[in-house]
Amino acid sequence: MAIKKKSPAVAEPPTQLQLFDRAIQLFRAQNLPQARELFVQAISGDQHAISQAARVHINICDRRLAKPAPNLSTLEDHYNYAVERINARDIATARHHLDLAQGIDGNADHVLYAQAVCASLSGDSRNAYENLKRAIEIAPSNRLAARQDADFAAVAQQPSMQQLLFPEKTPF
């Protein structure tokens, strides 16, 4: 009896639906260049509805990718753009614009608070603490906001942050 050798498994190419689903995930994560590539691949296939949806998303990607750089000049311009970038989880760009805003006014509590959020989301607990501490010194209402802000979850349990957020619970 002859022993049959198994041929190496050849991976099946992804289906049109699988390509579209992966493209949607990338699109939602704001990874537009890679999402666009997969939408282009998802056009080919026999499912007309998926092809049409992929074309629509390619157009959206193209518009967003071709978006000119914003013309920002004021503290509020840089701050608002940074907040939009934080929400898109583009922390490096957000930090850059918050640095520019801080250069205009180093004591703007909302800018310091946003800097603390960026640091927290990056896992930089020291800078999260320092910026939030300054923001609270300028405007104590930032303490309550930070207590309720999910963006501080990564650093909120650290002892220094606990003391900053809940000074009334700190034993003397």
Image (cartoon, grey):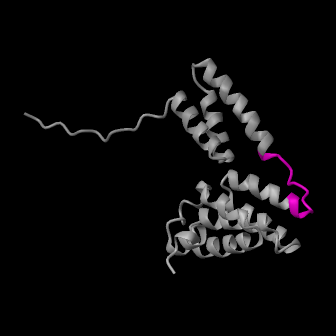
Q: What quarter of the picture does the N terminus occupy?
A: top left
* The residue positioned farthest toward the left in the image shown: 1
Main SS class of the magenta portion in the image:
loop
Residue at 24 percent of width and 39 percent of height: 6
Looking at the image, is 130 positioned above or below residue 146?
below
Residue 124 visible in the current orientation: no
**Percent coordinates x, y for residue 161 in the rendering:** 56, 71
Residue 49 visible in the current orientation: yes
Looking at the image, is 148 positioned above or below residue 130?
above
* The residue positioned farthest toward the bottom in the image shown: 172
Q: Is residue 66 magenta?
A: yes
Residue toward you, 126 or 149: 149
Looking at the image, is 103 positioned above or below residue 17?
below
Residue 107 occupies quadrant: bottom right
**Percent coordinates x, y for residue 50 in the rendering:** 61, 24
Residue toward you, 75 or 90: 75
Q: Is residue 135 left or right of residue 129?
A: right
Residue at 72 percent of width and 62 percent of height: 141
Residue toward you, 90 or 144: 144
Residue at 87 percent of width and 59 percent of height: 76
Q: Is residue 57 magenta?
A: no
Residue at 63 percent of width and 42 percent of height: 28
**Percent coordinates x, y for residue 23 in the rendering:** 60, 38
**Percent coordinates x, y for residue 60 in the rendering:** 75, 36
Q: Which residues are magenta?
A: 65-77
Count of numbered badges drawn on the protein: 0
